[in-house]
Image (tube, rainbow, N blue to C red):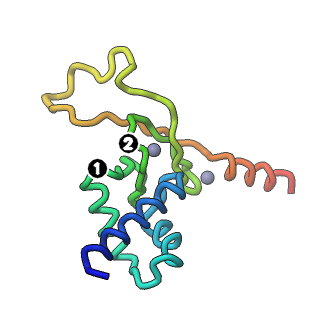
Amino acid sequence: MSEVRRNTRQRQVILRAVRELGCHPTAEQVYDRVRSELPRTSLSTVYRNLGVLADQGLLSTVAGAGKEVHYDHNREEHCHIRCSLCGRICDVDIFPSDMEGFPPEDLSGFILQEVSINLVGICPACSGKMEKEKTV
Ligand SMILES: [Zn+2]
Ligand SMILES: [Zn+2]
């Protein structure tokens, strides 16, 4: 297989993995997922390809998600909620452009490029675990 075709295939597999993983995976989660299909792919290759896919607009990265970069296949306007315990990120149906008086007019002279709202909470899996610990 030619280099170009191999790279294209790699990227398709990686993009599909992000879609299938759904909940905004990190590069390491994507790497775990594609390893069986792309046994010779390294974590740094996965990182690089995720970067290319983001540059091409096929993926976006989740803003304000903490240290690790999380990737998102949903290109529609939407916001996120992140679990403060396990870091899992889900979509929430808030549309900043529908909100009255938002974004505000006074932006300290900034030119607005993007609006995102990030909520933080405790996910059902973590709150379930906390409940269980309480009863023990
Ligand atoms: Zn959690
Ligand atoms: Zn999302």
Q: SS of the residue at dot 2?
A: loop
Residue 128 vs 52, above or below: the answer is above
As drawn, the residue found furthest toward the right would be: 136
Categorize mark 2 by other alpha carbons within 10 Å: few (<14), some (14-19), many (20+). Answer: few
| Horizontal side of residue 44 vs 36, given as left or right | left
**Residue in the foreground of this view, choosing between 58 and 90:** 58
Q: Quadrant of residue 3?
A: bottom left
As drawn, the residue found furthest toward the bottom would be: 40
Tag 2: amino acid: Arg
Q: How many marks?
A: 2
Q: Residue at x 42, y 50 (%)?
A: 73
| Horizontal side of residue 136 vs 124, given as left or right | right
Categorize mark 1 by other alpha carbons within 10 Å: few (<14), some (14-19), many (20+). Answer: few
Task: Tell me the residue that label 1 is attached to.
Answer: 57
Q: SS of the residue at dot 1?
A: loop
Q: Of marks 2 and 1, which one's residue comes earlier in the chain?
A: 1
Question: Considering the image in quadrants, where does the N terminus appear?
Answer: bottom left
Q: Residue at x 45, y 78 (%)?
A: 38
| Horizontal side of residue 1 vs 72, given as left or right | left
| Percent x, y of residue 34 | 49, 72
The response on whether ligand 2 sits within 8 Å of label 2 is: no
Task: Tell me the residue that label 2 is attached to.
Answer: 75
Residue 122 vs 4, above or below: the answer is above
Is disc 2 in contact with disc 1, using a CB cutoff of under 8 Å? yes
Question: Considering the image in quadrants, where does the C terminus appear?
Answer: bottom right
Residue 101 vs 28, above or below: the answer is above
| Percent x, y of residue 52 | 27, 62
Q: Residue at x 52, y 73 (%)?
A: 32
**Residue in the foreground of this view, choosing between 132 and 115:** 115
Q: Residue at x 43, y 44 (%)?
A: 74
| Percent x, y of residue 16 | 46, 60
Tag 1: amino acid: Gly
